[in-house]
Amino acid sequence: MSINKELLEILACPLCKGDLKWEESLSVLICEKCGVFYQVVDDIPILLPDSAKPLSELGKAPPPNERP
């Protein structure tokens, strides 16, 4: 999976409106300012405030293809 570079430039964290960093190996977008990440499922970023997870859970998140 990959995020289009142009799309990544306009995406922002829904909580703080800050920049997001794409972590391709984990299929997540990271907001370092808020200390949270958002999963990307089937190339679609899930950028809902309620879907933000703390970075401490990053290793515990199920892969996108195993989500219920």
Image (tube, rainbow, N blue to C red):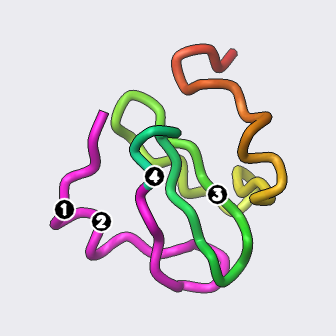
Q: CA distance from mark 2 to mark 1?
A: 5 Å
What amino acid type is highlighted by mark number 2?
Answer: Leu
Q: Are marks 4 and 3 in contact (CB under 8 Å)?
A: yes
Place residue 12 in its image quadrant: bottom left
First to last magenta residue range: 1-22
What amino acid type is highlighted by mark number 3?
Answer: Phe
What amino acid type is highlighted by mark number 4?
Answer: Glu
Q: On screen, 19 above or below 55?
A: below
Q: Quadrant of the N terminus?
A: top left
Provide the residue designation for mark 3.
Answer: 37
Q: x, y (%) of residue 13?
A: 55, 73
Q: Quadrant of the C terminus?
A: top right
Q: CA distance from mark 4 to mark 2?
A: 11 Å
Instruction: Give the number of the disc on residue 23.
Output: 4
Secondary structure of residue under mark 2: helix
- Determine crowd level at label 2: few under 14, some 14-19, many 20+ residues with C-alpha closer than 10 A: some
